[in-house]
Image (cartoon, rainbow, N blue to C red):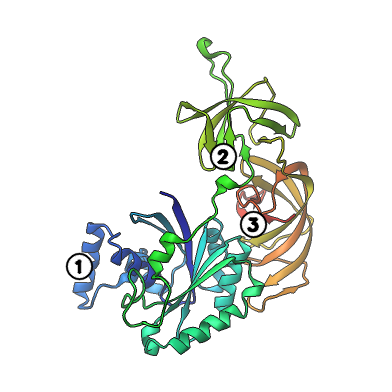
Amino acid sequence: MNTLKFITAGNVDDGKSTLIGRLLYDSDSIHTDQLGVLQKQTKQENVVIDLSLITDGLRAEREQGITIDVAYKYFATSKRKFIIADAPGHEQYTRNMITGASNSDLIIVLVDARKGITTQTKRHASVGSLMGIKKAIIAINKIDLVDYSEAVFNTIKADFEAIRSELAYDEIAYIPVSALIGDNIVAKSENTPWFEGDALLSTLEHIEIPTKENLVARFQVQWVIRPKDEENHDYRGYAGQILSGTYTTGDSVVILPSGIETQIVKIERHQEVVNQATAGDNVVLHLANTIDISRGDTIVKTNALPLTSNELKAWICWLDTAPLQIGKTYLLQHRFKTVRVKIQAVDRKWDVNQWQFDLTHELGINDIGQIALRSSQPLFFDPFAENSRNGSAILVDETTFNTVGALMFLP
């Protein structure tokens, strides 16, 4: 049973929290004790269960009426497991949305049926596209408030299709829903007989997501294991998580940065010897030759090498209140490899609301831009669009050790 990670995004008051609450409630994915607390709360208020409380778990969030961080929820059906990232809708929380989108396979963009496609709708859709998400669901919510109008649904669908060419999604599903009432969330609604597609849950269960097992093989060493006891003095293993692709005993591999070629002679997973391991597996690789390998070194197959350079181009989302400084040195953390980098230039800033690039030399908090960097040592990476696990990194301030930027490498 594979796991689908998806993010929800939409304008404030478009009903994201209610949608997720309805999805969990109608699919019987709420714990009994949690449901009891909700019933008790709403009984005291003399109203029906407020499903948005399922995701708006922080009292401060409910008092402010907004979701201020990325909240994660987990549930499963007989067909699939799910991880939901509920991102805030305000522009000033773009960094939160990027955090949630960076690990998501699909995005649900909520659109208020009464308002149609808005500037924030475009922003959310474009951020999801930038983060490499290929599957999207446009949930046209509050369809009950426009009398379940097929014409309204078709107009919003046509409006989004008009901007589709600007986005990198390869599959988009349009679903009319009412999160408050439950129309087309878990089951098809009789109120929309004109809608020929599947309900939201069924769409989530059956949509095909490319797996990281099909990507090129990437592995970065987290730990070098050399037991000190005499019985295992010949043991030397390289532990870490397979970022993408598949490794098999007998594979010819090259170690980077040394460039030494060797062969995998044994793979251990959960302290058991296996013949093959795939993306997401935590393993220990054993090699045919004794090689000087350190934390952060990369082990790849000889026929599928990554890009190698210390001159880097990348998208960056700036996360810090202090602006990015050209010429300043930062620490770049690429998985377990840390190098010092200097910002060479800010090429342009992306105006996500106007869908245009602005020439600038400055980036502030929540800004997204393209930058040029020079690293003290070569990095071994893939373009983010081709392999997000090996194509992303973070910037850390050398002085404060704050994480200040999220990077997505360009070819």
Give the position of the C terminus as an image quadrant: bottom right
Q: Quadrant of residue 86?
A: bottom left
- Badge 2 density bin: few <14, some 14–19, many ≥20, Cα 10 Å: many
Between 394 and 159, which is closer to the camera in this rendering?
159
User: What element does badge 3 sit on?
Assistant: strand
What percent of the width, then of the height, locates residue 20?
A: 38, 67
| Callout in the foreground (2, 3) | 2
| Callout in the foreground (2, 1) | 2
Distance (Cα) linking label 2 and label 1: 46 Å
Q: Earlier in the sequence, mark 2 or mark 3?
A: 2
What percent of the width, then of the height, locates residue 250?
A: 62, 27
The residue at which mark 3 appears reads as: 405
The residue at which mark 2 appears reads as: 242
User: Which of the labelled discs sits on residue 326, or is there none?
Assistant: none
Q: Is 235 drawn above or below residue 307 in the view shown?
A: above
Q: Amino acid at mark 1?
A: Lys
Q: Amino acid at mark 2?
A: Ile
What percent of the width, then of the height, locates residue 408?
A: 66, 56
Q: Earlier in the sequence, mark 2 or mark 1?
A: 1
Q: Residue at x 65, y 67 (%)?
A: 367
Q: Residue at x 58, y 39 (%)?
A: 246
Q: Quadrant of residue 91?
A: bottom right
What percent of the width, then of the height, locates residue 157?
A: 52, 81
User: Which of the labelled discs sits on residue 40, or is there none?
Assistant: 1
Q: Is residue 1 visible?
A: yes
Q: Quadrant of residue 289?
A: top right
